[in-house]
Amino acid sequence: MTSFLVQSHNHPITKSIIIKMDGSGYSVALGRWLCALQEIHEKGDKADLPIEIRLEIFGHWLRDHQPPWDIRDEIRIPDWVTPMFEDVWFRNTEFILPAFTLTPGSSRQSAAMSLEVHVASFLDRLCRRQRAHATPVTVEVVVDVHADLRLSQDSIRRLLLVAYHLEARKELLNIKVVVDTDSHRGKLEANELIAKPLKDRLQNACSTMQQFKDGSMNMAQVYDSVGRVHDTLGLQGFPRENVAATVLNFMYDVEQKEKAEVKEEQERAKQA
């Protein structure tokens, strides 16, 4: 681990700040921030700009140059984000939770999957910023090239858990649907025809999680929202939010049933 002691004359904005680079992709890329800030000071000195304006300029630089902040991979926010820099960092950083998939398991295995402790802690901290603007967290949900949701179960569950932690702060959650091309191209953002109907469903499910968190919905109502009978035994022993997220994941079954009903109606119409 490398440490840099920044001493910038009498500027309180950068005086005696310890910057620790832990070797992560984010930290290495952000090492350029020091040069940018020094350049801002040089121009600010000539124009006699106040600290608030310099911070605002630095925020624009962060927005244009720093990489996205992966809340899963980055265990803690950068050491240089002292109280003076905290607001400008939260307002100008792109926060993401990339999609990932696991081998589909049973509902009990699914209910055992929680958000990482540091991810939940970050979301709680973001949610506590009641009076300060912050960039929303973009949570990716993956589908296959046929928009099949079976591939999406784990990323949907994580999305619902994020919604639970963010509670009523709907403005802090952004849903992004990506398509797994199963090729060297990796994951691509889904077009509107695929993304919009799925996002509508996911936003409704996230709203249910938020109502469950604030107590306006109970577990029986969560089950009922996806046409399931309340199971008081099958998922005992798991955190309540994990159970709710697992239950809402049954939306895939609901969608498959709806598609089957539509297909049956189309077949009957052809025969009529």
Image: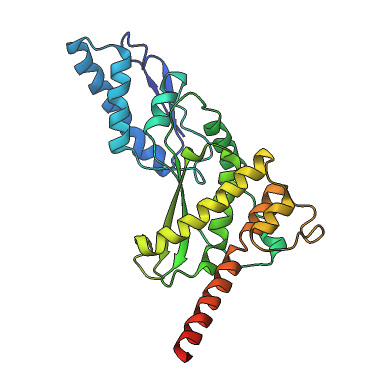
Q: How far across and how far down the image is residue 59, in percent?
A: 32, 28
Quadrant in the picture for residue 168: top right
Q: How far across and how far down the image is residue 178, in percent?
A: 41, 59
Quadrant in the picture for residue 179: bottom left
| Residue reaching furthest to the left | 46
Viewed as shown, does residue 205 lie left or right of 137?
right
Front in this rendered view, residue 50 or 200: 200
Front in this rendered view, residue 235 or 197: 197
Say if residue 240 shows up in the picture: yes
Q: How far across and how far down the image is residue 41, in percent?
A: 25, 17
Q: How far across and how far down the image is residue 193, in percent?
A: 37, 64
In this rendering, the count of numbered labels is 0
| Residue reaching furthest to the right | 233
Front in this rendered view, residue 21 or 48: 48
Quadrant in the picture for residue 111: bottom right
Front in this rendered view, residue 64 or 241: 241
Q: Residue at x 55, y 77 (%)?
A: 261
Q: Is residue 95 above or below residue 152?
A: above
Say if residue 111 shows up in the picture: no
Q: Residue at x 46, y 37 (%)?
A: 22
Q: Is residue 271 above or below residue 172?
A: below
| Residue reaching furthest to the bottom | 271
Colouring of the image: rainbow
Q: Is residue 153 above or below residue 148?
A: above
Viewed as shown, does residue 7 lie left or right of 117?
left
Q: Residue at x 70, y 57 (%)?
A: 223
Q: Residue at x 35, y 68 (%)?
A: 184
